[in-house]
Image: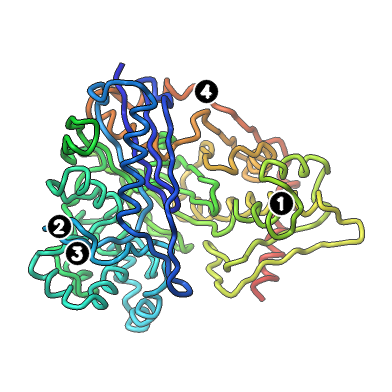
Amino acid sequence: MKYILALDQGTTSSRAILFNDKAEVVTKTQKEFPQHYPKPGWVEHEPDDIWLSQISVAREAIEKANVSPRDIAAIGITNQRETTILWDRETGRAVYPAIVWQCRRSAERIEQLKQLGKADIIKDKTGLVLDAYFSASKIEWILDHVDGLRERAEKGEIAFGTVDTYLIWKLTRGNVHATDVTNASRTMLYNIHTLEWDDELLELFRIPRAILPEVMDSAGDFGMTHPEVIAGIEIPIRGVAGDQQASLFGQLCTDAGMVKNTYGTGCFMLMNTGDKIKNSQTGLISTIAWKRGDEIRYALEGSVFIAGAAIQWLRDELKMIYDAAQSEYYAGLVDDSDGVVVVPAFTGLGAPYWNMRARGAIFGLTRGTKREHIVRATLESIAYQTLDILTAMKQDTGLRVPHLQVDGGAAANGFLMQFQADMLNTTVRRLKVTETTALGAAYLAGLEVGVWQSVEQLRTLQADVTVFKPSKSRQWIEVHYDQWQDAVRRVME
């Protein structure tokens, strides 16, 4: 039996999952690492913490599985996107802490660029909205704030990478400086039409080309691990993708119109738009889904800021539930929310509203309102926000959505998934294997080395699916969605 080792480097923890050739989880290991908040709105990681946590769980996963490292056919890597690391090419040591995707320190620079009228050119070239979220302004900030670094960067002494690139560098002991197209497309420096680093954008952000990694396909040859790094042997690295794109591939959303939604702290919804870039008129992001040989797939992406975090709010702040699973129990105790609508705009509203000033609210309270109604309405708000994004995607693309693939922690909530299916009037499908981000990286690597021969073969391995079928009338959907949209309008007034 052959195995694929997936390294899943996330924002708060590093995980390693060993899959067998039936795409089943053999072992799973995880280790959290510290988050640093040096100033309000700033978020940093120590690159050494990222690396040491990731390599330790990789070694542990192999040891726990009690398999020969020689039976590991390849490694796949998936990662938190946009997080930015610069390091010394000679020593491999980071020259500054990793600036995390959540960090807002470069927001003032972004506003300056907006005032200079640069938003449209960035959107046209990269598919992205001009925002501090992406890597470009983070790189620029580090080059501006570390003495002498820009000069060293121009001499080729410094390397830049998103987390995937940093891990590849460390795994190969500096032999490979590369990223894949999905991660490159999140830097705000990569032209998704020409599939090249864009000179005009590099000049705009004053970033030397010498620091940039080679951009490769999502399934390809990213080198071999150094024998001293893992288990005393070389293991090929053959698949790399940013976390949300990896999840899209892990869900096998390989055809245009197929959509996945990850229910985490927020929601990340991606729609495969085929081999064509779809420019959004509703505030969504156009991005590269993956590239395998001559096959390139693009996607539209929309984000819900508060999803699972709203369930945590019920638990931690309102003390209405003891744990997240209990929310399903309380929601099932009542037939409906009795007119209560929760808008969890705790940090503003994302797509398609894009209102940063909106704040959360609960509407429709009466003397008869009970905990169960508020808990149910909070879960319903996650489904409503998902419908907002999917409606925008359909409007932008005109594509038919055959079903919604789901993953993430809150996807385990049966009430939420059924309500989601009802509101979308679309079948919702939940895989037995919930680790779809790691699975996507494993699929990319496994296809590249021949553990699996085709996507069609992978589909036969995904037979164990829980299906939620829509059961409500069009009138029922419209009444509920009208209540939601009215509540959203009111928090934006």
Is residue 255 at all visible to an observer of this figure?
A: no
Return the x and y of residue 396 as percentages of the image width and height. Answer: 46, 55
Quadrant assignment for the N terminus? top left
> Helix or strand or loop: what does disc 3 sit on?
loop
- Name the N-terminal-most of marks 2 and 3: 2
Q: Examine the rendered structure and indicate whether residue 139 appears above or below residue 425.
A: below
Camera-nearest label, 4 or 2: 2
Q: Label 4 crowding class (10 Å Cα cut-off): few <14, some 14-19, many 20+?
A: few
Q: In this rendering, which labeled residue sits more in front, label 3 or label 4? A: 4
Q: Mark 3 points at which residue?
A: 198
Q: Circle 4 sits on which residue?
A: 464
Q: Which one is in front, 186 or 324?
A: 324
Amino acid on which disc 2 is placed: Thr
> Spatial distance from mark 1 to mark 4, Cα to Cα?
33 Å
Work out whether mark 1 precedes mark 4 in sequence or the reverse, and give the earlier one. Answer: 4
Name the secondary structure under disc 4: loop
Q: Position of residue 199 (x, y in %)?
A: 16, 67
Tell me if 173 is positioned left or right of 438 in this view: left
Q: Residue 478 carries which label?
A: 1
Q: Marks 2/1: CA distance? A: 61 Å
Tell me how far mark 4 sits from mark 2, CA to CA: 47 Å
Q: Nearer the viewer, mark 2 or mark 3?
A: 2
Q: Name the residue under label 2.
A: 91
What amino acid is labelled 1 in the image? Glu
* 2 and 1 marks in contact (CB < 8 Å): no
> Percent x, y for residue 453?
28, 22
Q: Residue at x 70, y 59 (%)?
A: 484
Q: Which residue is drawn at 67% across and 76% down?
A: 493
